Amino acid sequence: MRRFALVLALLMALTACTAVSPEASSTTTSDQRLYVSLGDSYATGLGPNGTGESFAQIVAKRSGLGLMNLACNGATSADLLSQEACEPDAGGRTQVDATVDALRSGRVDLVTVVIGSNDLLEPCAVAENPTECASSAVTGTKTNIATALTRFREAAPDVPIVGISYPDVFLGAWVNPSLPNGEDVARTSVSLYQDFNGEIAAEYAKFGAKFVDVTNMTGGYGALTDLTDDPKYGQIPAAVAEVCTLTYYCDDTDVHPTPAGHQAIADAVIAAGRGTPPAPSSPAPPTSER
């Protein structure tokens, strides 16, 4: 987290995952097996053009499970424990409380959690010391995740739980003309995501939960010297081209996934639920090195 300040300097320009939450869509019947989705706007399907199909909806359809989508746009890890869930039938319960009740019913076959991005964006973008803020945010995120997972495991020790990270959207700064020093931001973001995801993954592992590292799956830890020919941007790092395909960041400075991004996350979640590793992304082969 030591080089966080450069990235955070740009975050005030982002809407990120902080729009007012609509009611998250759920599709359940009284006797159906359930998939419970917790988190933020990645789970609700929010994007620059409104709300569309999220990875959670794709997972539910392909798995034949009813979806209880408790996620809220703008949610932080603390909100999972303290704020009302956005699923219409949550009845005023928090995302964690509603999940615990569902787990106790014995009907849940899968729980996913995508959380953490908003823990950093809102407070640290305006903090006097962004680096210290980021370090504190990681600690808080881990604590809140541990609290939630403790309750989930008490309610249902064996139900599959999958934590989900985010694509490294800041790689898109490499080609986004509205951002100053974009290439420096992209380079800094690689270690930023590695540090954050490594700590969060370890927290999930303590509870026997799986962790889908979407950052790694989408090439976010790759060398930025590996170039590819992109039809829009020309010769750019392969990892940048991948994040431009999977999110709206490169064109719109919007961190949310495109339909292709939601599909990629869904594929990884389903693979994790089956106990198989997700297929790595396959950007065009590098053409040269810089």
Image: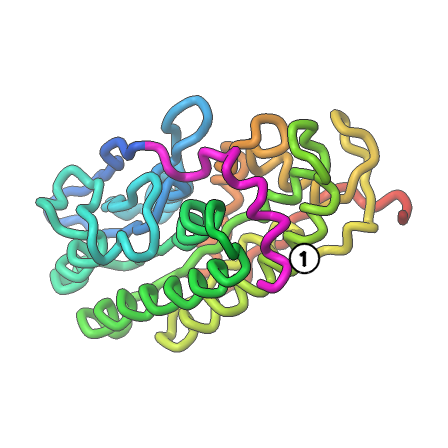
Give the quadrant of residue 78. Answer: bottom left
Would residue 246 be seen by someone viewing this image from the given angle?
yes
Tell which residue pokes out farthest to the front in this image: 128
36 on left or right of 289: left
Residue 226: where, in percent of width, then height? 82, 49
Residue 131 rendering spot, x and y as whole percentages: 54, 59
In which quadrant is the N terminus drawn?
bottom right
Question: Would you place residue 99 above or below residue 155 in this image?
Answer: above
204 left or right, relative to 246: left
* Residue 7 shown in magenta: yes
> Which residue is depicted at the point 63% across and 49% down?
6
The answer to whether residue 33 of the structure is visible from this angle is: no
Secondary-structure class at tag 1: loop
Give the magenta-colored segment's residue range.
Answer: 1-19
- 133 with respect to 252 (left or right): left
Q: How is the image coloured?
A: rainbow
Q: Residue furthest top?
A: 49
- Determine the image quadrant of residue 69: top left
Q: Is residue 255 magenta?
A: no
**For this rendering, which residue is in front, 62 or 238?**
238
Q: Residue at x 24, y 67 (%)?
A: 152
Q: Vertically, is 203 above or below 188?
A: below
Magenta residues: mostly which secondary structure?
Answer: loop
Determine which residue is flagged by label 1: 221
Identify the residue shown where x is 38% and y is 62%.
141
Answer left or right for 115 relative to 32.
right
Amino acid of disc 1:
Tyr
